[in-house]
Structures are given as C-alpha cells and as structure tokens.
Image: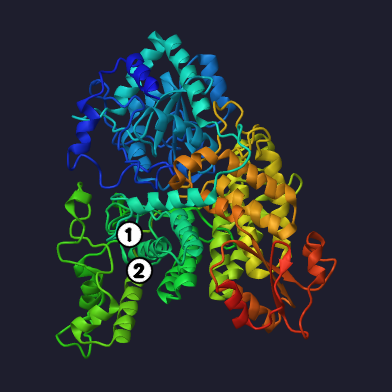
Amino acid sequence: MLGARAWLGRVLLLPRAGAGLAASRRCPGVWPRTWPHRSPSRGSSSRDKDRSATVSSSVPMPAGGKGSHPSSTPQRVPNRLIHEKSPYLLQHAYNPVDWYPWGQEAFDKARKENKPIFLSVGYSTCHWCHMMEEESFQNEEIGRLLSEDFVSVKVDREERPDVDKVYMTFVQATSSGGGWPMNVWLTPNLQPFVGGTYFPPEDGLTRVGFRTVLLRIREQWKQNKNTLLENSQRVTTALLARSEISVGDRQLPPSAATVNNRCFQQLDEGYDEEYGGFAEAPKFPTPVILSFLFSYWLSHRLTQDGSRAQQMALHTLKMMANGGIRDHVGQGFHRYSTDRQWHVPHFEKMLYDQAQLAVAYSQAFQLSGDEFYSDVAKGILQYVARSLSHRSGGFYSAEDADSPPERGQRPKEGAYYVWTVKEVQQLLPEPVLGATEPLTSGQLLMKHYGLTEAGNISPSQDPKGELQGQNVLTVRYSLELTAARFGLDVEAVRTLLNSGLEKLFQARKHRPKPHLDSKMLAAWNGLMVSGYAVTGAVLGQDRLINYATNGAKFLKRHMFDVASGRLMRTCYTGPGGTVEHSPGSARCLLNPPCWGFLEDYAFVVRGLLDLYEASQESAWLEWALRLQDTQDKLFWDSQGGGYFCSEAELGAGLPLRLKDDQDGAEPSANSVSAHNLLRLHGFTGHKDWMDKCVCLLTAFSERMRRVPVALPEMVRALSAQQQTLKQIVICGDRQAKDTKALVQCVHSVYIPNKVLILADGDPSSFLSRQLPFLSTLRRLEDQATAYVCENQACSVPITDPCELRKLLHP
C-alpha cells in the first residue's frame, strides 16, 4: 500500500516523509506512558509498535496556526448522542460537535450537502479516547469545524465491530500502525481517504495537531475533491484484493505438522526467557498463544520442543500472575503491561481478558497440578462475580483505567490501584510476632510486593509525573524467600500477606471507582460463560458452573430473538438494574447494532458447548446447534469458504466485507468457529459441519502457511481436524455420585481434542437421536461406565476413574 501513502501526501500537500514522526519515536518523554489502544489484530504481537499520533499518510502535516483552547465554562447542551445507550457515545453527548451515530441519517446528510464524513471510533474505557475528547472534542473552535465542514459520526467499536474492522484495515494498510481512538475521513459513499489514531489538538515540535488536519482536509476537499474521490476508489479496490480470503484452487488445508512446527518456531524466536511473554514492551497476555503452546506440548510431550512449549506457557503465566498486570488487591488482570517485566500496567480491565485468562490458568493447573494456577483462576472469577456481573446473570464489558484520586479531582490513570508507603504503613501498623527484627505487617507486605518510599514506577513510564511516589504491587520474592528473610514460617507469611491485602481492599473501596462500562456484549458474555464453565469443571466447583449457567440463561432471555433465531449484539443496564436494548424493540429490525455479528455466534456457541460438557444439560447443546445453523445461514461464504464477520445486509454501504484473519486480544471468530464445527461434528456426526471446517481451514491456508503465529488458535483447529477426535461417553445418571466421579476424572485431564457426552440410557434423548451408536453402550453391573471412542470404535467399558485417567493420559 505504499502507493496509497504517496498519493495521500500529494493530495494533502504534505511534505516528504522524514524527520517528523520518526524523530518523535527517538525522543524520551515524547510518548505518553500508555499508548493509544491498538487494534486487536496487532495488539498482542511484537511485530507492531504503538503510535500516539499516526496519520495514514505517515508524514508530518504542515502547521495550521494556533487555535482556541476549550472554553473554561462550556455550555452543557446535549447533541443527538444523548439518545443513545452506548456508554462511549454518551461520554460525547455534551461535546460542542454535531455528532451523528452511525446510520443512514448521517450518510444522507453527507451526500445532500456534499461534505466529507469524519468518523471517530473508540470505546468507553479507552484512555486516549478520553484524552482526545477532552482536548479536541470539547474545544469550541474544533467543534465548529467538525460541525460546519464535515458530517461527524461517532462509533462505539464494541457495538459495531464491522465498522471498526473495515476502517482499521485502511488505517493499518496506509500508515505504520493503528489503534484507538481511530479517526478516519470518508467520502459520502463511505470510502476512506485519510485516517489516523490520536491527534493532539494543536501542532507540536514533532506532532501534527488535529486542528491542522481538519483545515487541510477541508481545503483539499474544496480544491481537489475529484482527485480525492478517484484515489479513494483506487485504495478501496486495492484493499478488496488484499483482504480477500478464499479457497481458490486449493482442495485441502495445509499439513498440520508443518504449520504447527513453524508456529512454534516463530513463537520460540520471540520468547522472553527472563520474564516470559513474546515482546519487549508493551506486553499483552495473549491467551491464544498460551493455548497453542499447551496443545503443542500435548502432541510433542516426549520431545524437547514439547517440554519447551510447556515451560514457555507456564513461565509466562507465572510471571504475569506475579507482576503488576495482575491486581493483587482486587484480583483480575489489567489490559497489558507497559514494560517488559509485567510491572506497570495499562490499568483498564476488560471482560474478554478475564474470560480467556481464567481458562488459561485452569489449563495450566490441569497440566501441572500446581494450585498456584488454580488460585489465580479462582481469583479472576471472584473479581468478575463482584465487579463485572449483572444481577440477572450477564457480564459487563470493562472497567476504566482512569479515576479521580479523590472526589472532585481530575481523573488520572491508575489512581484507584496504586499505593504510597505512607498509606500502607497507616493501614497495616500491627507488629509481626516472631520475626528476627522489628517488623510490621505493612513492612512485610511492602517488602514482598516491592513498595518503596520513592515509588516503584519509573519516570520514563510516567512523563506527566502523575504517579510520583506511588507503587504498583508486584511480587518480588517467593513466599519462602520472604519468610526466610524475616525468620518466619511460610504459612504465617501467607496468612499475614492475605490479611494485609484484604485490608487494602477494604480501604480501596472508599476511593472513587473507575468508570464501569455496563454495556453487555453477546460475544464477550459467551467467552465468560466458557471461563466459568471450564474453570468450574476443571476444579469441580458447581458454584462456578452455576455462574456459567446463569450467564447462558441471560443470553437466551435478553440477547436472543426467538422469532428469528438470531442473537442480539448488545444490551445495557437500565434504571434499577433493568436490562435495556438500543434503541428499543420497536426499531430493532431497522437498527443494525441490534443484531449479532459472527463473533457473537462463534463465542456464544463455544460457551454453550463448554457449558454442556461442564453441566451435562443437553438443552445447552441443542441451542448451540440451532445457533450454529443460524450462523451458517448469515455469515458463511458459499463461494470462497469461511465466515464473513458481518451479515451482508448489516454491512450494506461499507466498502469491504471482511473475514477476520488474526488471533489477537480475542481469538478470530473463524478460528473459534473451526473448533466449534469439529466439536459439533463429534456431538452429532453431521458430515456437513466437518466439511465446512475443512473448507474454512482451506480458505485460510495461505495465511497459516506464511504467518501461523498470526493465527495460533486456527492452527490448533487445523491440528485437531487432522487428528482423531475423542468421543468420551459416560453412561449413567447425571446426578449420581459414580457418574460425577467419572465426569470429574475427564475434566481433570488436559484433552483439548475431545467431546464429553452423557448417555443417560433414554433412546429418545437429543444425543441418542444424533448418535445412534450411543444406544449400544451399556452400564457395567449397573455402575456409571465410561467409553472412549475414536474412529467409530470404542474402548472396553471402564468404571474406575483411575483406570479412565490412565487411558486418557497414558
């Protein structure tokens, strides 16, 4: 796409690319401590670097003069976003900007008045979205420019992932990065011609100001509009060709062994031996990579590479859990670490991270038997139950990174989570008995978690000086070392630290809390159902499985349209804890954000399959099958193979209809769908789903061959498809103790390529109708009995959980 960058520079009368932005990357202190939030397609990869002010032409823009500062007493007059439900859009409802939500009203205005569209995309817990809103969108003069010379459209990327993906593809293709806020200028026909991420309001020594960008685009639209339109069409055509994913002439997907080994080698090359993870900084959790490494270990466990894969994954998980990216006081994980050591995080907490990490830590426990990992998983789910759960069973999207240090003060990132030495000393003054030197509980905790008087946050990570003297809790020593340092018993130290953390937690309750994004998304709720179901099953805790069940009931009650069989994308917390939809059921059929996207179906189906295996309630499996049928009708590409991210009707007018080809902060919906199709084939024997899986994997063949590390979750599916799926059948009464013992035995072993089936002996049951061979399997001596079936052949009957475990994990 170098041609696109060149014409953008010419059309906007920009100087040749050179010292401008490149110089800013070399200047310490120029970049803010946390970067603009990156696109999930690159957000967990070391191949991409964050940008704090990227323009799709990748060159500095000329100065546009000084503009006015935001009014010190802005009038609180709402714009039309006040009628929206999205927390992100509502944050902009009092901007002096004539904002429109994404929709036909805005497009018609742009065409009628022949104005370019300014599209601004973000989400409610995005730190740099807050910054641009405060600096630019509250600025009266910038507001007039946006309102008079553009049709300004605001989009919540979590409501409209299709819009976000299309224009992020443009920004990434025509610049050196991408992220949020994402700001793109479109023709009235929705074709992009300029794009970038965060812009400061005015020009600096090395950064172009937002006001300058607006003035230049306004000028070029008036003087060179035809050239803009022609080149915009050229870029769109190039993006169409570049983004096409199709079976083509290929008949079968690539060799799983070859792709697997290449993916492992690429990960091994980027692995951080000391601190774990797969980049220098910033560092992301990347659960999809950890899941791949676990699967790779299972199929190579007798080799050196297999042992290496296990070590890489377990070490990464341990270093993350000990680092500041984990909230040691309130549990749960922050979005990412700004440094190599997992020490200082970007403090935002996302539901999808909690869901996937709960599964990753549960799998680590299955593999290692180390309760350290199961404790972390339980802590994650404890945090979600306390802070991200609706009373009706649904799960909220996120908690912000920013909050006021004290009521009435300006929000600062991390204020809710950091501590001074003085605070800890005042909260934990009690002397520790039996220590070899005078010691208080506070001193013990500060030693273990690395708190210092000057603060443990480097000035390079805090250029604004907001966190001076503050500390992020991060485990510096093992319990054994801390105990030895003070001559204490290990269990006594554990008890003292836990007691101290609880007191900090209670004290933290009195601080102003970060903003809660109470929007509920079907996709992320599906991931969270998986998180609770898998962890509950592995740990044998029905309480956790009940959370998963309540989450699934919430999805069916509030986010599923029975008449059409379709999922809805979003719902919101209303007054008194009620559940609302946007903008209301009367307009639901006409409003695109109402309906689900591919990821909603894929992630919910995965959640339901996990919930069936955890609970053995076949109603969840039946619903999963119906949703998969609907997904196939709405999103399947019958010509090229694979699934489109959005329905054709919902994406009408968008220049691209994409298939997501990257496993990032969240897995690609196509990757998850490949796994779902394999599992559904195992549950039902329906050949069509296996054929679809093979076709999907074939469509993504070239991507997996070239950069398998970009699709580790799909590479796992490829391996599963080319291996033999285990059908583990338990014949017994779901509530009987001997049945539960066999089921728990299965859950205690890491077996990713399997389906777990309960056969209760009823020939009219749903699963018996799907798999007739179940009627031939009998209980042995009236005891719950297990069979392990592969390639249409079953093992001898097994009634002893220990014998079953040996068969499953030789």
Q: Nearer the viewer, residue 443 or 256?
A: 256
Question: Looking at the rendered structure, which numbered label has been put on residue 713?
Answer: none
Q: CA distance from mark 1 to mark 2?
A: 23 Å
Which label lies toward us, 1 or 2? 1
Instruction: Give left or right: position of 93 versus 435.
Output: right
Residue at x-position 22% and y-position 79%: 429
Q: Inspect the image, locate mark 2, and give the three-letter code of the amino acid beneath it.
A: Val
| Residue linked to disc 1 | 276
Instruction: Give left or right: position of 51 versus 621.
Output: left
Q: How many marks?
A: 2
Q: Nearer the viewer, residue 430 or 772?
A: 772
Give the quadrant of the N terminus: top left
Q: Inspect the image, locate mark 1, and give the three-letter code of the amino acid beneath it.
A: Gly
* Of the image marks 1 and 2, the number of the one nearer the N terminus: 1
How dense is the environment of label 1, judged by Cα within 10 Å: few (below 14), some, or many (20 and up)? many
Residue at x-position 15% and y-position 85%: 438
Q: Is residue 522 above or below residue 188?
A: below
- The image shows residue 21 at horizontal and vertical percentages of 24, 30
- The image shows residue 400 at horizontal and vertical percentages of 39, 52
Res 809 seen here:
yes
Q: Nearer the viewer, residue 261 or 601?
A: 261
- The image shows residue 688 at horizontal and vertical percentages of 73, 47
Give the quadrant of the C terminus: bottom right
Residue at x-position 46% and y-position 38%: 93
Label 1 sits on a secondary structure element that is loop
Q: Is residue 484 above or below residue 312?
A: below
Res 160 seen here:
no
The picture quadrant where one finds residue 609 is bottom right
Label 2 sits on a secondary structure element that is loop
Question: Looking at the rendered structure, which numbered label has been put on residue 329?
Answer: 2
The picture quadrant where one finds residue 511 is bottom left
